[in-house]
Structures are given as structure tokens and as C-alpha cells.
Image (tube, coloured by chain):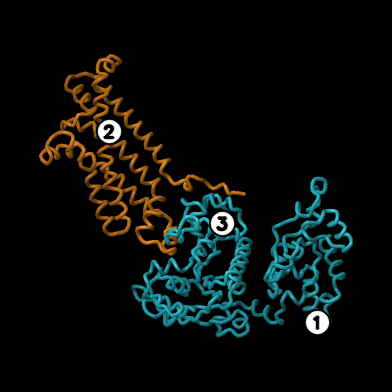
Chain colours: A orange, B cyan
Amino acid sequence: MMTFFIENSSDILLKTWEHFYISMIALALGVVFAVPIGILLSKSKYISKVALTITSVLQTVPSLALLAIMIPLFGVGKVPAVIALCIYSLLPILNNTFIGMRSVNGNTKGAGIAMGMTTVQSIVLVELPLAIPVIMSGIRLSAVYVISWATLASYIGAGGLGDFIFNGLNLYQAEFIIGGAIIVTLLALLADFLLSKLEKWVTPKGLRIEGGHAA
Amino acid sequence: MLKIENLTKIYRGGKIAVDKLNLDIQEGELIAFIGTSGSGKTTALRMINRMVEPTSGRMTLNGKDLTKMNAVTLRRSIGYVIQQIGLMPHMTIRENITLVPQLLKWPKEKKDETARRLIEMVNLPESYLDLYPAQLSGGQQQRIGVLRALAANQDIILMDEPFGALDPITRDTLQDLIKDLQQRLKKTIIFVTHDMDEAIKLADRIAIMHEGKLIQFDTPDNILAAPANDFVKEFIGSHRLIQQKPNIKTVDEVMIKPISITIEKSLDEAIRLMVEKRVDTLFVTDGDNRLQGYLDVESFTGARKTKRSVSECYEKDIFYVKTGSKLQDSVRRILKRNLKNIPVVDEEHHLVGLVTRANIVDIVYDTIWGDEEPTTSSEGQTVSDSFRELISG
């Protein structure tokens, strides 16, 4: 096992980096699309039902099939992989953004409106800051999903740590499979850890304080 | 000032929440909307700042038609105290207080100055400005909720069951605060409540609503004296109608002269004064006879060795009533808070009198045994003081 890591060290670094940035681009795109859509959906009951159903359906398409569909549409390589992974990351983020925005205390929202906030001000100043913990947990969930699914992206020529695993499968080399899997797992854990730090950092301070009345 | 004409709200499905409401509210009045649940009182209140859009009718504020104004602009010009407090949990107390000024894009210095000025007004330390709502008690939070409605110098303040979520004692303190703020700042306040005691205690005029209609709109005294119909009578409750019967007395008629000491005196002088006047409580005033606090025998325990002057050990937390307040309110407060006595102050906070438990005994005696001249008001101080010793001893 150690020989695998030593002999392929430069390749491992390269593939890990590849894996990491494919996942992160997909996740970033997912956030860019899903959060604003989630916010819009939280403002309309009817459309939200339809939209959340559509994304749920997309989620049930087997990931390998989704990647295969990408080939006739976008060819092979990193671009179709990123698109497919991005689609996958949508649902948890969208769902959590929607739930987070909806779960903001109605009285707090009402106070903002009664003070004379416009809809946009209410979203930016009240709802979004209060929804951040929930949205962030959706992003963390998506990050872990995307990193593990990015393994499959190697199937359509996107590279990444999946290359080791698929090579291992083709060549009957167990250490390639296990080695690749270990690194993917570590990467997922690392991403989750970093995002949890980010979550702490972006959560408004007032929400982190528990009770404890001042004298 | 605020004129409401034929204001009506019909919800989808045809339910008439408010039916042709007509009110004429003067500047500086404290108005209570009261009624059972479903009477339309909250809907009526919320139509004033257009949180609920009226179906028909007119509202004019100093001649300006509110229904034609931009709703957002309108809301920024009307203070609103929401039920269940509704502070922003992710904002500091400072940010919460200056929320409307923030929306109006005031400069930072002006906002900070406002926050400092306001928090001082409700007797909370300035350091609280940097705390978050979760760090304050419910009563403190709602005080901030009230300040938030005052921050942008709104002339009208709407309150939607502002004290519903609070325990009785905190509620009582906040009611006093509202009354005090309103008298000091001359704001027009309209509040919704289902608590008749609260309405009687606070309001200049009470609007009693039932099934969307205004049943009676008058001063508490007039409503108690002449309920418009059986519904009002029932709503007020028979016990209040009986209470109201005896001629209404104010604290001024029964209060006695309090023994006071100025703040810079030494403790020895204070004790000598207590012994000489045979009292256990001294009221601490500044050079101008303005009430600062009190000093009682308990303040001395242990303090005498380390502290030498009145200013070091007097109690600043003191309940008082204003001259002209109704006697029954003061009595209620003395009993509810288990106070020995309650000082009376005038508009400028000068100490002018004192109502003690002994006075109450006199009044009870008076009511039960009839017309004999009460022994208090004029030369009766010694009598009351010995009574007071009896009670406090």
C-alpha cells in the first residue's frame, strides 16, 4: 500500500488537485444557481413545489447515467463533468435555502416589514442572515456528495482521483482502488471540515450566543 | 391628527374583519383598541401602517391621505411595537434600536447618539448596546422593542399587544414605562390589548370593538360610568363597575409629607434623622428636591463600616407615582409589589408626597366605617408614621 503512495506521489498530487477543483467549481456553480433560486422559491408557494419536484427527480437519475448523457451534449472532459456535478449539487442547497428562508420566524420578518423594509431589504438584512446556518449545512452536504461523485467523472475523461480507481478496476490492482478511495474520503472530510469553519465564520454572532442573560 | 373614516377590511371569502370604523385621534393621545379575539382590533391597527391593506375607507394623518402614500415610506414614519417582541436576533441591541434610522440612511454618528440617548431613557446601561437580544431578559428585550419604535422620531406609535408575552410584574413595569415615555415625549400611541386593566391603566380613550364594529369610544372613566350596552358591561366585568363607584380619589388627597435627605449627607446624619423622625425609610433627593432613590434600615446593615455617605449606599431602584394618579392604581402597586410605601413625584420629578400602607388602612377604614374625617391628610403625620412602624416592624 505504501509503495502505491510513494511510487505515484506526483501523480496523486496532480489527480487530487484535479479532483478537488472539479468538485469545487461544480459546488461553487451549484451555490451560485441554487441559493438565489432557493430565495426566489421561498417567496412563492406554488412555483416552489414544482421546482423542488423537478430537482428531486434530477437527483434520482443515476449519476453514471447523467454523466453518460453529458457526452452527446457536451462531449468528454472536464466541462461536462462539472455540469453534471453541478446539477447534483443543486438539490441539497436549493432545498436547504428554501427551508432556511421559510423557517425564519414570521414575527421577526413581520417586524422588519412593519419597520418599513422593502422585500429586498427584508431578504438581505433579515431572512438571509438568519437562514445562513441552514443554507451552509446544505452546502456542506453537497460538497461531500460532489467530491465522492466526482470519482465517476473520470469515466467521461475528466480526470481526478477516479482515474486511480478505474485503472485499478481494469488492471486488477487492489491498492489503486483502495488508495484512490482513501484519498477521496480524506478530501471529502477535509472539505467538510473547512466548510464547517466557514459556516462558523459566516453565521451572525448574535445567533451563536445561547441564552445566558446579562445581569 | 389621525382621522379614520369608514375604514373597512373584507378578507377574501367575504369575512368582514373591520366594518366601517370611524375614529378621530388627537395628537398626544394614548388610545387602546380592545376586544375579544376576532373583534378586528389587530386588523384595524395593522391597516394604519398598511401591513393590512384596507378594502375601503380613508385614513388621513394631518390631512395627508395614508392610503395613497407609498407603504414602505409610511411604515418608516410610524413606530411599531410587535407582539412577541420580534427583535432581530442577529443584530446587536444598537442595530436593533436604530433599525429604522438605518433604513432611512442616517449618518452613523446620529444613529449612535440616538441609541445612547434612548437606552438611557429606559434605565439600561449603555454597555447593553453591544449585546445581542438573546443575552437580555424578556422584559429588557421588549423595552428595546419599544425604543426601536421611537428611534426615528415617529409621531405615531402602534403597539400590537406589546406586553402579552411578559410576566405580570414585568408587564406592570413596562406599562409604567410606556405611560411615562408617552407623557415625556408627547407621542400619539395606539395599542391593541385584550386586557381591560391594561387599557384602563394606560389609555386616554378606549375603543371597544366587537365583531369588526366599534361599540364604544370614550375615556375609561366614561366607559366605566356609562357602558354603551350589555356587551360593554359584560366586557368590563362587574367587579370593575363596582370599584368605580366610590368617588375617584387621587394620591394628592391622601399623601403625607415624606422625610427626605439630600444625597451628599453622611450616614450618621441619616441615622440621626431616622431616629428623630421615627421612620425607617428616608427618600434621597438631590439639591433640587428631585427624587433619586431611598435609604432604609436594610441599606445600613453591613454598610456602615465601609461606607460613610448617603450617596454610596442608597437604593436607586425606586417605584413612584406621579401627582394626579388615581389612588387605586397606587394601592394596587403597593400590594402587588409588596412595597411599604410609594413616593409621589411631580412632572419634574420633585418629591412631593408619600403614600404609605398606613394611608391605605385609613382609606379602607373610611370606606368601611363611613364618613368620619380621616386622621391623615393635615396634621396626621405622626399617626401614620406610628402605623408605618407597626406595619414594617
Place of residue B249 in the rendered image (x, y in percent of width and height, measured from the top left): 72, 78
Residue at which label 2 appears: A148
- Image-based side of B381 in relation to A108, left or right: right
**Local SS, label 2:** helix
Kindly identify which numbered label has been placed on residue A154.
none
Specify whether disc 2 shares its chain with disc 3: no
Specify whether disc 1 shares its chain with disc 2: no
For the C terminus of chain B, the image quarter is bottom right
Q: Nearer the viewer, residue B135 or B149?
A: B149
Residue at which label 3 appears: B116
Chain letter of the residue carrying label 3:
B
Measured Cα–Cα span from mark 1 to mark 2: 91 Å
Chain letter of the residue carrying label 2:
A
- For the image, the number of numbered tags is 3
- Image-based side of A62 in relation to B71, left or right: left
Neighbor class of circle 2 (other Cα within 10 Å; few <14, some 14-19, many 20+) is many
Identify the amino acid type marked 3. Arg
Measured Cα–Cα span from mark 2 to mark 3: 53 Å
Identify the amino acid type marked 1. Gly
In the image, what residue occupies the spot 41% across and 51% down? A130
User: Where A201 falls versus B299 (above or below)?
Assistant: above
User: Where B387 falls versus B57 (above or below)?
Assistant: above
Identify the amino acid type marked 2. Ser
- Image-based side of B181 in relation to A108, left or right: right
Question: Which of the two marks, 2 or 3, is nearer to us in this view?
Answer: 3
When asked about the image quadrant of residue A182, the answer is top left
Chain letter of the residue carrying label 1:
B
Measured Cα–Cα span from mark 3 to mark 1: 53 Å
Place of residue A176 in the rendered image (x, y in percent of width and height, measured from the top left): 24, 21
**Local SS, label 1:** loop
Q: Nearer the viewer, residue A202 or A175?
A: A202
Residue at which label 1 appears: B370
